[in-house]
Amino acid sequence: MISKRMSTSGRRLVLVLVVLGLLVYQHYVPDGQVADNEIVATQGSVQQAYAAGQSGVWLETDGHIRRVLRDDNEGSRHQKFILELDGGHTVLVSHNIDLAKRIPAREELFLTVRGRYEWNDRGGVIHWTHHDPDGRLQGGWIEVDNVRYR
């Protein structure tokens, strides 16, 4: 009888620990994000994520600004531009300028970006190009002429 109680208590303890572990994981990796160190770092990664319809993919890529768009001033302010990658694929970059410095965006400017890719039928969006204000993730950045904007 004592061994049954211990066995049941042990099972309950394991269940509680598993649930706590999942809660901690959700707290540090919210909204189904991949862990911060899981970055797709190849030039073709945006095109691959687009073709596969993937979202929530952290990546690094580079390209030239094809078009600078007006800032989005609804809620958190975002600097927006269309980035053209090798091969002609374009992606919208939405850079939060309430959390990071504005980049000196102009057409044909070459830059490297690290952020989170979200799929859409127009080529996708890269956002989270800034530090994490909560300090949970490494966050992203945009690099222009060896200056990193985070």
Image (tube, helix red, strand yellow):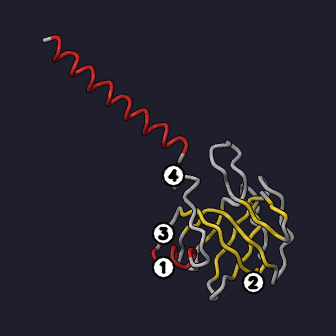
User: Is the residue 132 above or below the residue 118 in the image?
Assistant: above
Amino acid type, callout 1: Ala
Q: In this view, does 11 lie to the left or right of 39?
A: left
Amino acid type, callout 2: Arg
User: Is the residue 22 above or below the residue 11 in the image?
Assistant: below
Q: Mark 4 points at which residue?
A: 31
- Cα distance, mark 2 to mark 3? 23 Å
Along the viewing direction, whichever of 81 and 23 lies nearer the viewer: 23
- Cα distance, mark 4 to mark 2? 31 Å
Q: Which x, y percent locates residue 55?
A: 51, 65
Q: Which x, y percent locates residue 41?
A: 60, 69
Q: How crowded is mark 2: few (under 14 residues within 10 Å), some or many (20 or more)?
A: some
Q: Name the residue under label 3.
A: 54
Helix, strand or loop at label 2? It is strand
Residue 88 falls in image quadrant? bottom right
- Cα distance, mark 1 to mark 4? 22 Å
Q: Which x, y percent locates residue 15?
A: 32, 31
Q: Name the residue under label 1.
A: 51
Question: What residue is shown at x 37% (from left), y 35% (from top)?
Answer: 18
Helix, strand or loop at label 4? It is helix
Along the viewing direction, whichever of 66 and 137 lies nearer the viewer: 137
